[in-house]
Image (cartoon, grey):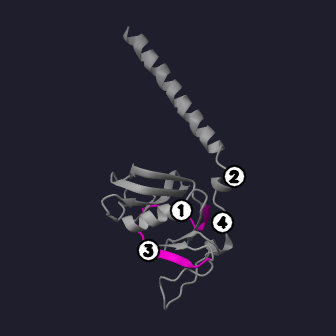
Amino acid sequence: MAGSSSTFVAVLTAAAVTTVGFLAYQASASVPAGLAAPRASAAATTEAPRDARNPTALPAGSGTGARVVYSVADDRVWLTTSDGGAGRTFQVTPGSVDPLPGTYAVTSRSGAVTGTDGIPIEHVVRFTSVKGVSIGFSAAVDGSTPAPDPTRRTGGIRASRADGNALWKFATIGRRVVVVR
């Protein structure tokens, strides 16, 4: 009797794993080509020049039009207007895994989830992944922006709640995200 129940559990487990694998494949196959992979741009792959007199100025060469610009080196985000000007800028606290420089698009959003560090987060805006780690912006519900645990691979880029709310309203599915050094 014990042998048949363990066989039954093994068959159910195999069926569940197969189903999840199929659904994951189906989901990845249905992502529009323009959102599936980053498109590196010449402007985003080099060090973007900064204005030494105004360190919060939008990096030169970070593109045009409405977009999110994220500087890995400065831990700063800009939400740009349709004419290309910096509409809002703010500091962020990155995770332990940085996105590569390039041009991406927002691929998914979640209103509220638990972060990989166990902290409840809101306004999650994802735009890429690096070696299996999802990269995106979020805000902790408790308002914290803790330094990342260097022993864990995390891709959450934390903003304050007010900045996270602004990002959530601005960065809808398909919105360009330009990552510069």
Q: Quadrant of the N terminus?
A: top left
Residue 97 placement (x, y as % from top left): 47, 61
Q: In front: 168, or 101?
A: 168
| Residue picked out by circle 2 | 33
Q: In front: 53, or 175?
A: 175
* Residue 49 picture quarter: bottom right
In magenta stretch: residue 92: yes
164 in relation to 25, above or below: below
Classify mark 4: helix, strand or loop.
loop
Residue type at numbered disc 2: Ala
Give the spatial CA distance, label 2 vs label 1.
19 Å
* Residue 159 picture quarter: bottom left
Lower sequence index among marks 3 and 4 = 4
Q: Which label lies toward us, 3 or 4?
A: 3
| Residue picked out by circle 3 | 90
Classify mark 1: helix, strand or loop.
loop
Give the spatial CA distance, label 3 vs label 4.
24 Å
Q: Is residue 66 visible?
A: yes
36 in relation to 77, above or below: above
Classify mark 3: helix, strand or loop.
strand
